[in-house]
Image: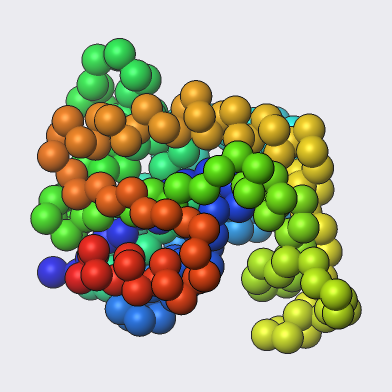
Amino acid sequence: MPLAIMIMGPQGSGKGTQAELISKKLDLFHFDTGQYLRAILYDPASQKDKTIQRERKLNEEGILNTPSWILKIVVQAVKKMAALKKGVVFSGSPRTFYEAFGHEQGGKPQKSQEGLFAVLEKCYGKKNVSVVVLDIPLKESIKRISARLSCSVCGSPFIIQKYKLESCPFCGGKIIKRKDDNIKSIMERLSEYNNRTKPIFAELKKRKYKIFKIDGTPAPYKIHKTILNKVK
């Protein structure tokens, strides 16, 4: 049965980079939650939608989007990918306890609302679901995000270098700085990660899911090798 891998960690830890490398190596879909959401939030055809307006405002302020709204979107995507009999690697999901398990921390499970892990378990089997947590210091996270640029078309990330790129080397799109990559939003997102994402890890261990904590500071290719050794 195909694999389902979650690459998790604080902002700037390299989730997207590692997920992309893993997707190519193991022939998996790469589901970049942030990029997927931005495509929805900035779709010109949806800008009058009140829900989109609300969620876009949250996103730009560095606050996590409404968990029930995110969960619905991600679960729909998972079921489509699973129907194609192909595995998936996530970068950016889940970010809240509710998204992961379908209820708030300390709350009671709801039969009417399955969390992402329950859906993945049904689609791929529990033994094929793995979680990789990339661990980096706070200062390194802030440094990386502050220097981050991305392509306005394909979303590929870049770090500000001595030689500045004017266009994306992959698709030719314009290189931009994300609106939410300012110091206020960065600190808000790191706080959200500590308060709303980290509690997921203890619950995963309790539920006997495979979870691997990996140092996210070495060179990307070294991290990639470590991840492969854990999830294959």
Judged left or right of residue 136, residue 163 is: right
The residue sitting at 33% across, 23% down in the picture is: 103
Residue 229 % position (x, y): 24, 70
Specify the quadrant of the image occupied by residue 170.
bottom right
Residue 162 % position (x, y): 85, 75
> In this picture, is 151 found above or below 51?
below
Q: Nearer the viewer, residue 182 or 178?
A: 182
Q: Nearer the viewer, residue 214 or 56?
A: 214
> In this picture, is 216 found above or below 190?
below
The residue sitting at 37% across, 27% down in the picture is: 199
Residue 78 % position (x, y): 34, 56
Judged left or right of residue 164, residue 198 is: left
How was this image coloured? rainbow
> In this picture, is 12 found above or below 21?
above
The residue sitting at 23% across, 63% down in the picture is: 230
Which quadrant holds the N terminus?
Answer: bottom left
> In this picture, is 154 found above or below 43?
below
Specify the quadrant of the image occupied by residue 214.
bottom left
The residue sitting at 80% across, 72% down in the picture is: 161
